[in-house]
Amino acid sequence: MSQSPKTVIGIPGRWSDRRDVVCSIASQSGGYLFAGMVMVKIGAEDNFTLEIYEHDPKLKNAFTIAGQGRLTDDDLEAIGSHTFTLYLTTEGGSVEAAKKLLHAGNALLKSGGLAVKVESAGTAHRADQWDEYCAHDHFGNLLQAYVSYIGSKGVYYSCGMHNLGHPDAVVEAKIPPNDAAKLLHTFVGYLLVENPKLKDRETFSVDADAPRYRLFHEPCRMYEAGDLFHNPFGMWKMIPA
């Protein structure tokens, strides 16, 4: 892999202007400062690129889709009336980087942000849910924050594991979508927690009595290199054994 993937989150809010953004971060974030295009954590080496974009009339719909029912009508109405969106970017590809961005995003929520959309995974979260992820930033909550599950018609896959430094997974099988999501979530959780040294043709199942799937590692073909969804760590293809 030539370079680490970028992890990007977007946080809309109702700030009056750029100065309001700067002042809100300085006074409400709990220890961060913003100047130029850089947000830093006071007393630490954490720094992030922060870009400010003006109102986007399509943003409410984007959050509706990415939120998959997690955002309330009130959340979405507030997002629809946002004035600016703050896009926070960091060099990803590790659990440590993901945790630091998790907390930096929460700092922006405390500074007037309304919700979070993980641009490098296609998932969105309420402000209170993101705060809960920060309060307990264990592996399970990192998966919830940074990984989504996509697919239909016998092909299902995870998206976002590159934010945590691991391959994604794709399953090709005629199984119900809920079963596919459980299989993918269990497998990528196994990758994250155990960091196993898997080899092609090994098998995996969610439990001793569940169907087994044979594993094959391959490059990420779902998205092209340069796309925020592209996983440079590749994907594990899962085929019924």
Image (spheres, rainbow, N blue to C red):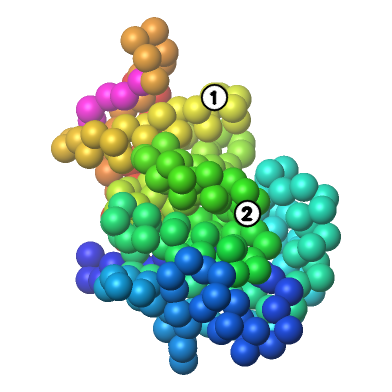
Residue 204 on the magenta span: yes
Question: Where is mark 2, residue-wise?
Answer: 127
State the residue at coordinates (46%, 91%): 36
Q: What secondary structure prevails in the magenta region?
A: loop
- For marks 1 and 2, give the CA distance: 29 Å
For badge 2, the amino acid type reads Ala
| Mark 2, other Cα within 10 Å: few <14 / some 14–19 / many ≥20 | many
Classify 13 as above or below 156.
below
Front residue of this view, candidates 145 and 230: 145
Q: Does residue 95 sit above or below 78 in this rendering?
A: above
Task: Residue 32 in the image: state x and y as whole percent.
Answer: 44, 73
| Label disc, if present, on residue 169 of the rendered structure | none
Of 59 and 77, the residue lying toward us: 77
Position above or below: 28 against 84: above
The residue shown at (39%, 50%) is 161
| Numbered range of the magenta stretch | 201-205
Answer with the quarter of the image where residue 204 lies.
top left
Pick the residue in front: 40 or 157.
40
Residue at (60, 77) in percent of width and height:
24
Image coordinates for residue 211, horizontal then vertical, percent: 41, 16
Residue drawn at (73%, 84%), measured in percent from left and top? Answer: 16
Instruction: Look at the image and tell me in which quarter the C terminus lies.
Output: top left
Per the image, the residue denoted by label 1 is: 179
Q: Quadrant of residue 7?
A: bottom left
**Residue 109 in the image: x percent, y percent?**
59, 63
Q: Crowdedness of circle 1 by 10 Å Cα count: few (<14), some, many (20+)?
A: few
Query: In the structure shown, which secondary structural element does the residue marked by tag 1 occupy?
Result: helix
For residue 48, say whether it is visible.
Answer: no
